[in-house]
Every structure is written in C-alpha cells, then in structure tokens.
Image (tube, rainbow, N blue to C red):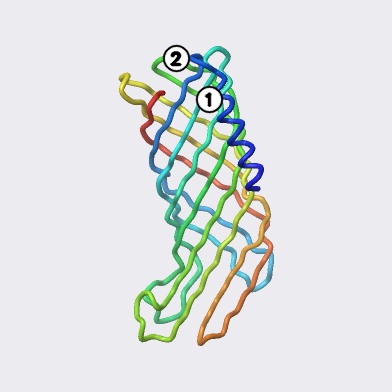
C-alpha cells in the first residue's frame, strides 16, 4: 500500500510541475466534523468496533488545470477517536479511546473553476487507521498493570466532492464531503494483565466511512 501511495503522490507532484501558469493550487487546513464509524467483526465473541465520535485536524491539497478542469486532490486527517470497547470494572475510563487517521488521494474533474467559486468531484484511494487503547499505569502506577488495545488498518476507496469559495483574494473557505468503504480487514486486540498477554483477531467485513470537513485555504 505504501508503494502505491508513493507512486500516486509522485504523479500528483509531476502533474503540477509541468502544468505551468495554468495550474492552480489550493493548500489549507480545517476541522474534520464529528462522525461515527463501525467495523463489523465476523468472529463470534469478538465485539464489533463502533467509534461513535471521530474528529480532528484536516490538512488538504487540491490542484487544478484551469484550461480543462482536470484536478487532483489529497488530504490527511488526524483525529481523536472513542469506541464502544469497555474497560474493566474500576478503571478510570469507561471505554477505550485513541487515534484515527485517514489518508486519501485521487483525481477528478472541476466543472466550476472561476476566481470566486471552485467545485470538483473525485475518485480517491487511501487508508483508514484506528488505534484505541487503555493503560492503567497512566492513571495509577500503584495498581496492577493492565493494558488493552484494539486496532485495524483498512484500504479505503472513496468518492469526494470539494467546494471552495474565495470572498477576497487573501484566502478561500472550503468544504469537503467524502464517502468511502472500509474494505474487509483484520481487527486486532492485545490485552495484558498480571504479565499475561492475550492476542486475538477477527476478520471484519468492513463498513461505510463518511468524512466531512470545513476549513480555510489559500490559492498558490
């Protein structure tokens, strides 16, 4: 997957390098609006993992060839994520919490590309990564050590719509909506209690991923 993403990134850079003055860039950052995601476990006794809230920082790049509307886009989100996975009774937290990351890049067409308005839609490829965990030593070092971690990494094909409005020349405002599908992958769980480690995994049949963002960007 890393090789494919590296090749795609090189193609994006080479496209903008040879496009000349007809190529416009939008570079920005924003807020990944809160959404939920669920990964369905196939193994009996292994909980499906639901993340009721995922939200964080969105970093985005969009480039467009103004002459014909060909456009490329990439973004990465680094998010807080909670989960439905309970911690043991007496823990300071009731459920595992952690980190989510989405990286997507792709190409598309922009039917609207004026000095004030820009709208485009894309086909995109990337990944969805989530790690939620609990470590008792972070809260009370006198307690018996207990750690519990659930994580997965999934291939994520998606479609994206991107809109930018430039009210003044200094900056633009953008909104983005992405709908993708987390492809089947493995869900892993690692637990350690009283120096005894337990590793389990389950195949997931995947789940729908919705990624809405808003933010500010600049034309270059």
Task: From the viewer's side, name the closer residue of 154 and 91.
Answer: 154
Residue at image location 36% in from the left, 82% down from the top: 141
Q: Secondary structure at mark 2?
A: loop
Disc count in the image? 2
* In the image: residue 71, left or right of residue 53: right
Residue at image location 68% in from the left, 68% down from the top: 43
**What is the number of the mark on residue 33?**
none
Q: Position of residue 99 (x, y in %)?
A: 46, 58
Task: Report the Cα–Cα distance between label 2 and label 1.
Answer: 12 Å
Q: Is residue 190 above or below residue 68?
A: below
**What is the number of the mark on residue 120?**
1
Q: Is residue 83 above or below residue 165?
A: below
Q: Give neighbour class at mark 1: few <14, some 14-19, many 20+ (Cα, 10 Å).
A: many
**What is the number of the mark on residue 114?**
2
Task: From the viewer's side, name the closer residue of 6 and 83.
Answer: 6
Residue at image location 67% in from the left, 57% down from the top: 185
Q: Give neighbour class at mark 2: few <14, some 14-19, many 20+ (Cα, 10 Å).
A: few
Q: Secondary structure at mark 1?
A: strand
């Amino acid at each position: 997957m890393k090789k494919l993403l590296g090749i795609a990134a090189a193609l994006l850079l080479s496209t903008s390098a040879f496009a000349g003055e007809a190529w416009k860039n939008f570079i920005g950052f924003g807020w990944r609006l809160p959404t939920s995601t669920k990964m369905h476990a196939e193994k009996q006794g292994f909980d499906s993992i639901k993340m009721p809230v995922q939200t964080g920082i969105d970093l985005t790049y969009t480039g467009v060839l103004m002459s014909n509307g060909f456009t490329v886009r990439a973004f990465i989100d680094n998010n807080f994520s909670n989960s439905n996975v309970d911690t043991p009774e007496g823990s300071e937290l009731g459920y595992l919490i952690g980190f989510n990351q989405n990286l997507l890049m792709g190409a598309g067409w922009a039917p609207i590309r004026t000095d004030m308005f820009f709208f485009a839609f894309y086909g995109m490829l990337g990944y969805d990564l989530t790690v939620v965990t609990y470590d008792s030593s972070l809260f009370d070092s006198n307690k018996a050590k207990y750690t519990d971690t659930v994580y997965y990494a999934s291939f994520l094909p998606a479609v994206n719509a991107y809109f930018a409005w430039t009210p003044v020349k200094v900056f633009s405002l953008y909104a983005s909506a992405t709908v993708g599908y987390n492809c089947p992958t493995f869900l892993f769980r690692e637990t350690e209690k009283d120096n005894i480690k337990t590793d389990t995994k389950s195949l997931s049949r995947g789940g729908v991923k919705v990624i809405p963002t808003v933010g500010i960007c600049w034309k270059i």
